[in-house]
Image (cartoon, rainbow, N blue to C red):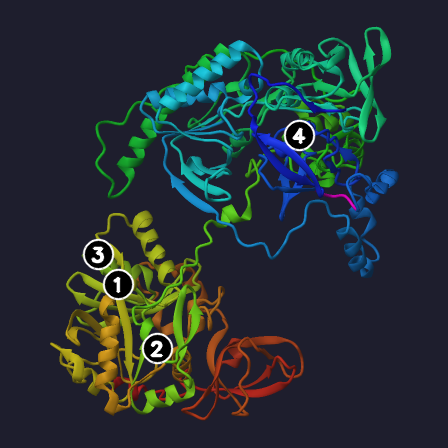
Amino acid sequence: MTMSRQGVQPTEVIDRAAKLRFRWNGKRFSGFEGDTIASALAASGVQIFSRSMKYHRPRGILTADYWDPNLMVQVGDDPNVRAGHRLLASGMDVRSQNAWPSLNRDIKAANSLLGRFLTAGFYYKTFMRPQWLWPTYERVLATFAPGGKIDLDTPHAYHDKRYMHPDVVVAGAGPAGIEAALAASSAGASVLLVEHEHAVGGHLRYSSDAADQAALAELRAALDASDIEVLTDSTVTGRYEDNWLGIVQRNHPIAVERLIKARAKTLVVAPGLIERPYVFEGNDRPGVITPGAARRLINLWGIKPGERAVVFSANAEGDAAVADLERAGTEVAAVIDGRTAARVSSTAGSSRAVEAVMVDGTDGPQRVEADVLVVAAGWTAPTSLLNMAGDRPVYDPAAARFFPSDPPSTVLATGGLAGDGDLDRLRRHGAETGRLAASRAAAVRHRLQARTARALPVDGDEPAWVPDERAPLGRDPHPELYRADTHGMVDMSEDISSKDLVAAAHEGYDSVELAKRYTTATMGPSQGKLETVNTVAAIAEARGETISEVGTTVWRPPFAPITLGALGGRMFEPVRVSSIHPWHEANNVSVIQAGQWLRPDHYGDPQGEVRNVRENVGLIDVTPLGKLDLRGPDVPKLLSLLYVNKWMKLGIGRVRYGMMCAEDGVVLDDGVTGRLGEDHYMMSTTSSGAGGVWEWVENWLQTERPDWQVHVTPVTTAYASINVAGPKSRELMGRVCEGVDLDAEAFPYMTVRQATVAGVEGCFMWRIGFTGELSFELHVPSGHGCHVWEALMDAGVDLGVGPFGLEGQRIMRLEKGHFIVGQDTDGLTLGPSTGLGSLIKLDKDDFAGKPELAWAADRPLPLVVAIQPDDPHVVPEEAAQIVRGETNEILGRITSSRFSPTLNRSICLGQVEPDLAAGGTKLTVLLESGKRISATVIDHHAHFDPAGERLRG
């Protein structure tokens, strides 16, 4: 097959004035703007684009579109690029995949000589024994892994996400899909039209028929005049419950890919049909193409597919290809009518090209010399989105394809997926579908608005649910053409032949789902778009059953691949700092990244910072602590629901500690909440839990308790937060505060007060102490944070005031035995394991996690305990395992460890089995070095001041 660029075509999409230069396997090539990688290479005479997965057979163009299994290439450091779809760009470095040392001379093609031994499932049969050789097998198999190469040093590209709530989403912008979108929009619906290809129009784009081109121009003009949002080079990849849709947009002007999450009221599925290959000997030889490939090459890119062609046609698409081939200058040597008994049985030639076609015609077997074979054997109906909606397709042997059966009432099919008809009939059906979709979307929209708490009032009564009175499309008869009298490739992505499927059926894998997994048929890059029906047909033939009896596999999301980058979304990691950060930078700070925040870790001597807090007074910037402003009469109910302890009687000016557990009873977060006024509360969370707790609160309010009168405002960054700690903290605060009595009786432990600090109004402060010292946790409007910090530093010079960082705070909290959620707990730590079982009030009516916590109350659970190594100078590594004696039986782990300058010894928290939690219990800790040390559990979590006399001041 020798392809070449021909004269200008009236329907071509290339700009011949815009030449683009690129490289293919190191050699210079050129194409035009509008070319795909494959069309540019084909126009330059390239015949071989890749090697097959298993046998490394040369592969050429088959469908010339997104689903072509033979056109996977490497572009720069981007592997597995679909050359039949990716548009050419200047400077591209394109390379072939799955070939060594080169595409033309692939040594691994020797695999084809071993084909009789590489049958379906040979991995399972060959590499099971002896087990000790598996590492060797693995290394050998890895050298044969297909696909491109991943560069781990590739810079992260920008990906994006978007959320939408359109009334109607139309998946597919062929003539029926466009008409559906236009009709729905005219009926008042907001419409999103999503097209998989680079432009709307479906099969009209590559039709040379004047009427088709006139219809395409008319439809495009109508779209341009509408307010429909059109996404091209985009795919509805998944349909989930209640029409929650995943849409991948590949042509965003900035993002590599954008994942759109759309909640549609109704979904119109109009993907058209996908041409499927015919199975016969040599059907994967370069030069065998579908009629759609021939027409795309000719009409979109002005490429002559070959010099001499045989066309095997069983439908109008194949017939149209004959006319296009002749117009392009390709000699049509023979037209084999598949609607008769005539068949193609095989191709002949080298492994690189078709040279002749073996035909079983009405005049008997004959050999027809040709370099291209066009095969129009039928279609695959891409019912994926309907499958995802719960519909199971039904096979019609008279039409030789699957059709929808009974999709949900908010999912409607139109176009070739729903049936057959001329262009006018398909357009009318699309318009009828669009009007029905819009009317049902209006009813769904009204229903959602009426049932959503705090939504705007609905306007009028709910619209009536419109019955489906569309005139059904017909079904044109089509011969069942799946396999000739010879065997060939069924799945070209995976190198699975009809022989492999027959053998699998004979081995007992007679279910299509089992055979699929055993042989890997339909599991390659095409994901069954070309090969599903042929796979089913091969199994049906092997079992002596009909295709209807065998059934089909069920397509699951995604319909088209999505990059991990698109799933992950924006690579935004904003660097967050407090308003006090400039002071830290000017004062010898060593910062640590804690989540998104840059926080002061220490100022040169964390041990000295601890001693200063214990003896004098210190300041720490705790701005990242989560802060939620809660207002409304039902806040106590919310707090009682979220925390494990009781909250209905919290007095104004009081503060209470609380622990939150998830529905499974696992510790979620902890913190304090204070009551500032009659219906005004302030909740604090851990720094790492700020965002998650906010979502947790809103989830309960919006989905479970929408009737509660609670307004939540996240104010984490609205306040700069400063903890003033140490025995001299009250004296220091008295020098800068106005309007508040700081005396121990007037402002006792676990209370909250509002005050003016350093002249700044609107401040509030807790009397709490994470460090174990007399402390005031001060929250000031963020813009005044640095001013208040500097005022405190200036006012406390004679008191020995100094800053301390996160490391010093962690030493002091460990001295006091305060656990940290996520460090001393993990994803399996239930509430009682923290040692705070008395805090959990199971006599409350209900709260998050209550059933699991009630179950756990009487169970032996691991417990958080305070541990002291017997050698006070050894500090075990965090996560060091606690083991039984000289064995490796794990009994727990060290969760936190530091050297305490206050106690002049090493101290730890850890999780241990319950029978080891009693004070005085001896433990064995296995260090990272392999050394074992002894340690002792102490009676109280607090290593220092267990009675809490210092923090109460």
Residue 718 disc label: 1
Residue 532 disc label: 4
Question: Residue 500: horizontal and vertical position, in percent?
Answer: 79, 34
Badge nearest the viewer, 4 or 3: 4
Determine the residue positioned at 81% across, 58% down.
136
Determine the residue positioned at 32% across, 27% down.
442
The Cα–Cα distance between marks 3 and 1, rounded to whole angstroms, is 24 Å
The Cα–Cα distance between marks 4 and 3, rounded to whole angstroms, is 57 Å
| Left or right of 448 on screen, residue 356 | right
Question: Residue 545: horizontal and vertical position, in percent?
Answer: 73, 23
Question: Residue 699: horizontal and vertical position, in percent?
Answer: 34, 52
Residue range in magenta is 96-100
Badge nearest the viewer, 3 or 2: 2
Per the image, the residue denoted by label 2 is 586
Q: Does dot 1 land on a helix, a strand or a loop?
A: helix
Q: Does dot 4 land on a helix, a strand or a loop?
A: helix
Residue 705 disc label: none
Determine contact: label 4, label 2, CB under 8 Å. no
Identify which amino acid the numbered label 2 is placed on. Ala
